[in-house]
Image (cartoon, coloured by chain):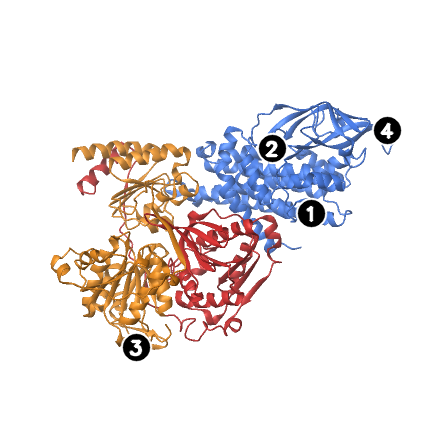
Chain colours: A orange, B blue, C red
Amino acid sequence: MSEFKNTVLEEFKDVWVFCEQRQGVLMPTDFELISEGRKLADELGVRLYGLLLGDKVEGLARELAGYGADEIIVCEHPLLKDYTTDAYAKVICDMVVERKPEALLVGATNIGRDLAPRCAARLHTGLCADCTHLDVDMGIYKDFLREASTLPEEKIAGLGSAIVLGKPHDVSRDLKMTRPAFGGHLMASIICPRFRPCMATVRPGVMKKAPFDQKRADSAVISKPAVRLAASDIRTQVLETVKEARKLVDLTGAEVIVSVGRGISKDIQGGIKLAEELADVLHGVVGSSRACVDAGWITADHQVGQTGKTVRPRVYIALGISGAIQHQAGMSDSECIIAVNKNENAPIFEIADYGIVGDLFKVTPMLIEEFKKAMENK
Amino acid sequence: MDFVLSKEHEMLRKMYREFAENEVKPLAQEIDEEERFPMETVKKMARLGMMGTYFPREYGGAGADPLAYVMCVEELAKVCGTTAVIVSAHTSLCAAPIFENGTEEQKMKYLPKLCSGEWIGAFGLTEPGAGTDAQGQQTTAVLEGDHYVLNGSKCFITNGNVADVFIIIAVTGTATDKRGRKVKEISAFIVERTFPGFSQGKHEKKMGIRGSSTCDLIFEDCIVPKENLLGKVGDGFKIAMKTLDGGRIGIAAQALGLGEGAVEEAIKYTRERVQFGKRISQFQNTQFQLADMHTRMQAAQYLVYAAAMKKEEHARNSKVSYSMDAAMAKLFAAEAASDVTRRAVQLFGGYGYTREYPVERMMRDAKITEIYEGTSEVQKMVIASNLGVK
Amino acid sequence: MKIIVCVKQVPDTSGKVAVNPDGTLNRASMQTITNPDDKNAIEAALKLKDETGCRVTAVTMGPPPAEGMLRELIAMGCDDAVLISGREFGGSDTFATSQIIAAGINAIGLEQDDIVFCGRQAIDGDTAQVGPQIAEKLNIPQVSYVADIKKEGNEIVVKRMLEDGYMTVKVQTPCLLTCIKELNEPRYMSVGGIVDAYSKPMQVFDYPRLKDDPLIEADTIGLAGSPTNILTSFTPPQKGAGMMLEGADRAACEKLADILVGKHII
């Protein structure tokens, strides 16, 4: 890889999206990233490629293209059937070295976050993790900052270059990759000014999926380059892939989440039951704070927060959750936050849209009845 | 004088605190209400070396010092007085006298099992007719061939229901004191629960430390092998008094932790609770109360730590006595804990009187520290006697 | 066999997160802790040590005070520790960091049956990148998101979590595994471990110690060796104040239900 000169930036062009499939099924992030990639390719005036790896996956290509790709590069090989870091990283790096894209987007799934850093390290380039916003065009980026930051206007207006290794560097053609840190208390826009491709993993569920365009799906180029891969390239062996049999709590896709916290301690089972009833009324699911998981009151798949799931439901109801920063990190983007807590100074009230100071064991039964009535009368 | 803790002691504090917060605090209310001995916690503590903190490695101990032990009891007591006294009675009243007075065989036989928590230890001195007055002992031990036969009973024995090994003080005959008076000859024995003739009597229902077991022990022709005599015949009183000197440091540490725990709870609560449109921490009465409470506990901490360090010095140089230091530490810490926990309840108001908050439990737990292992009055006798005021 | 565990000291974000006026994190005002996932990695290594008697070495890159964290990990049961520390290493992004840590692991020496453990990700950056990047720099296989580890002879079989299930993966050694919290419950330090913590060996690898490793070049470490740069950092605007419903009674609940229906939220 050492002969790969990736500091000659002008040799690199086009935006690529790694399209993840599992057992022949595309991931929802693929469509989000193709849609977002289209936007970026247009801002750069280049083509958008989807990069699809697998065994006998060509049939998935047109559907991907329908969300905005000009071309889908299909890399097929029996050894790509199951995901292995070694095989996938080799094929992707080979393709990048050969075709030189300027940006490569990868969904920040458990697989994407395994694959992308390995590739970035091999390609000697920068990678920004778990991005929630991407821009190239400075005007659009500045508008984004005006809306999403507390930066003063003069600072935003003056943006245009960065000091890179002591010299000013024009950032107008750089991909500006914005990501939260410390659970969204801080945001940072990262650039990769000296190396190509610029790489980002993108948080699932954040980018908007474009409408499917049949014409684009039909007209896109599907290419199938040769894949150089041998069994000896792969040092891991997938013995089995199991779809979790137990019912996973689908927190990330839920429209309504009713979460419980330490406040249920005086009657754990009763508290969880109330949350389940309330969730049932609103057709939602039950979540929890880390405290409840750590105490063994509820299984880890319920956990919302920095070390649990990041959720953005329409309605998030926090019962007896104080709202530590880690918890807020996972739910503060919810459209409507309702908090019930005995302690009126609980931090959860600082981000709640509606708050009730009271004992959840007294308030929740009334909420269940009132919501039930309201839902029936709608 | 060095008031800075070593890096190791700071690290121990952090570890004890994490353990207490995560493993002990969540059970504190439950074991109090159910009067349940937290055996699961004992097993966890044993794995971490907390059941044999300051005994040497060759006996299965963790190899730390008495200060490390005191900090352990203190941090446990901040969240649960019961758990603290289990460790204190086990360590100070059973493992310590074996370590300090036992033969090599006795130490090798008992200490590894006590330090590993496989066995729990207890101490039997108090009898219905002999509490503070140890000379009032009625339990007898008579040598018959290769064993002693014990008869009598002991009461208020901490860890009594669960202990496997007991240090038992009994009368083995009569002796003549320095002034030529006939006195009881008192000896100490290591008694295992499984010895024939050993049984336990009624379980006390207590005001505080309700998860700790307290019960009577009954000896009916209880057979104790001769080799289980601890120290020499007639050493019993001395062993008992020295054991209590050490035990008092443990109880002082328990009192210290209870008081500090109450201060922490009160600070947290008064910062949250609003009355008359203000947080109650904004009222000067609250501020002065908390300043006073914290100061008393800080003073107690100095006394308790100083006693622990004196005990460590004693281990190196037996001429150094820590008897008065232990008595002062216990006297002051116990009274401070009783006072501070009571004031904490007052600051909590009505909520403080409910079991929803831990301060009422702390107040009930604190009271016993003024009573057991020598009442406050006995501590004053010890201190006065050390001052030569007779 | 030996295990090298890569750990990071991070600000404790369980309290309030303090942000400087310029939008950077006010680290000075926050306590530091061992990164939670890294503690799971330590526990995984110590479990294997309990089973096999292998040696466990904790490695971190950070300023000199990070020694305190390493001593705590020794008190949990690690045999020794390495602190990679030097001004030359400052300002490194994940690429440069992995370059330096990989050089540190080379200096310790990675043998055929060794394993490197990392936590899944650090709570201050949440990138989850350094583990895989170290593996790449060491040219060893990796498995990330590991929730169960079995050592069967010379093979390691792990459960690798996916969002919707898991994979069972067999991996050759030497390899790198990144651990998630479902893997285990980290043990506490022990009293005996703390007593010995400061007498166990701890090496400091500074720049001169590592500079001859091919991974360490002026343009592969520190700020100059970091492909990424921060263009701007900022704090998001506060959400408008919410509405507190007076009284925890039925009227309040009814009012809330009405509002939510009225706004088509439910």
Nearer the observer, disc 2 or disc 3?
A: 3
Q: Is residue C222 left or right of residue A202?
A: right
Vertical comparison of B323 with C138: above or below:
above
Residue nearer the viewer, C263 or B252: C263
Q: Which residue is mark 4?
A: B181
Q: Which residue is mark 3?
A: A8
Task: Calculate the distance from the C-alpha at mark 2 to the C-alpha at mark 4.
Answer: 35 Å
N-terminal of the two: label 1 or label 4? 1
Label 3 sits on a secondary structure element that is loop
Residue nearer the viewer, B321 or A371: A371
Q: Is residue B147 left or right of residue A336?
A: right
At a point 26% along the width and 71% down the height, the residue shown is A99
Q: Which residue is mark 1?
A: B58
Query: Considering the image in quadrants, where does the N terminus of chain A appear?
Result: bottom left
Q: Which residue is mark 2?
A: B368
Image mark 4: chain: B
The amino acid sitting under disc 1 is Glu
At a point 38% along the width and 67% down the height, the residue shown is A121
Task: Calculate the distance from the C-alpha at mark 2 to the C-alpha at mark 1.
Answer: 35 Å
Task: Calculate the distance from the C-alpha at mark 1 to the C-alpha at mark 4.
Answer: 43 Å
| Tag 3–tag 1 contact (CB < 8 Å) | no
- Say whether mark 3 and mark 2 are on the same chain: no
Q: Which mark is residue A197?
A: none
Task: Calculate the distance from the C-alpha at mark 3 to the C-alpha at mark 1.
Answer: 67 Å
The amino acid sitting under disc 3 is Val
Crowd rating for badge 4 (residues with CA inside 10 Å; few <14, some 14–19, many 20+): few
Image mark 2: chain: B
